Amino acid sequence: MIFPLAVLAALCALNLAHAETQVRDDSGTNLRLAGPARRIVSLAPHITENLFAAGAGNRIVGVVDYSDYPEAALRIAHVGGASSPDIEAIVALHPDLVIAWQSGSSSALVRKLQALGIRVFQSQPDRMEDIPTGIEKLGRLAGTEIVAAKTAARLRLRLAALRRQFAGKTRVPVFYEVWHRPLMTVGGGQIISDVIRVCGGENIFASQIGMAPVVSVEAVLAADPWAIVAGDVGDGKRLDEWRKWPHLKAVARGNLFFVPTDLMQRPTPRLFDGAELLCQQIETARSRRPHR
């Protein structure tokens, strides 16, 4: 029997809808779904943003506080804060998938959700290349592979361009200030440290363990970075505090920079905008080094 083309297309769509989906998450667990997820709860603002980037924004039924990008995310039901979401609120949304941030969602929370029969996928982007890979995985989970693949391809092209541009350049010692009271930075395993490497910089606290270790002013002075960069929601005025130490290379050479927080401290496609800005700043610091 010969089927009309429209009927064949419908049959193919039906088969895809019921095909098992299997994706390995960043904890190493193979997650199996009977079909694409239709009701997703996101447990981190960056996960919400990445779901939209993967074309799965209309599948999200619950988000945590500060899930404010894109604008459509503001209209989604909230289930509490990222560190301690309301399990009852999550269950009430009848999700067929919860996506957790491995280093931001407690293991106890993940176990409780799994014990309730809820599928949990754990995400942990630690390098720039993990962002497009993660978006592709979200696309497979939601059945939006085509959109996710296009987004991932664009991001990989941008990353490759940055790597080519700054490969072989003089390494610039950089202090990245997450917050000033207490003084917090990023360890070597955090994605911002990877951005610094891509830009030809060197995180002066790369040896520190943890995502956001607390450091002392004295340790920064001892390392004497060529550039100080702050993640800031304003205009970077808090960097003026470093002017108390005029002999610090970053101060003496005018290399006090800031990057808008949302462009650097959320591992989403917007981080690539932040990376391009940071790379320009590090290049400026590189050009201001003393010439012998």
Image (cartoon, rainbow, N blue to C red):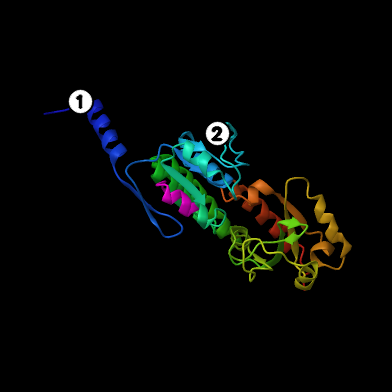
Circle 2: element type: loop
The circle on residue 182 is none
Residue 269 at least partly seen: no
Q: Position of residue 119 (x, y in %)?
A: 41, 47
Pick the front one: 12 or 275: 12
Q: Identify the residue under disc 2.
A: 76
Q: Who's the residue at 45% across and 36% down the image? A: 59
Q: Specify the quadrant that holds the C terminus.
A: bottom right
Q: How many marks?
A: 2
Q: What type is the residue that disc 1 sits on? A: Pro
Residue 85 at least partly seen: yes
Q: Position of residue 156 (x, y in %)?
A: 49, 52
Q: Quadrant of residue 15?
A: top left
Pick the front one: 275 or 77: 77
The Cα atoms of the two marked residues, 1 and 2, are separated by 40 Å
Q: Specify the quadrant that holds the N terminus.
A: top left
Q: Position of residue 43 (x, y in %)?
A: 54, 46
Q: Position of residue 86 (x, y in %)?
A: 56, 43
Q: Is residue 8 magenta?
A: no
Q: Who's the residue at 76% across and 60% down the image? A: 182
Q: Which residues are magenta?
A: 110-119
Q: Identify the residue under disc 1.
A: 4
Q: Are marks 1 and 2 in contact (CB under 8 Å)?
A: no
Q: What type is the residue that disc 2 sits on? A: Ile
Instruction: Please name the predominant secondary structure of the magenta segment in the image.
Output: helix
Q: Is residue 117 magenta?
A: yes
Q: Who's the residue at 68% across and 48% down the image? A: 261
Pick the front one: 142 or 98: 98
Q: Who's the residue at 57% across and 31% down the image? A: 75
Circle 1: element type: loop
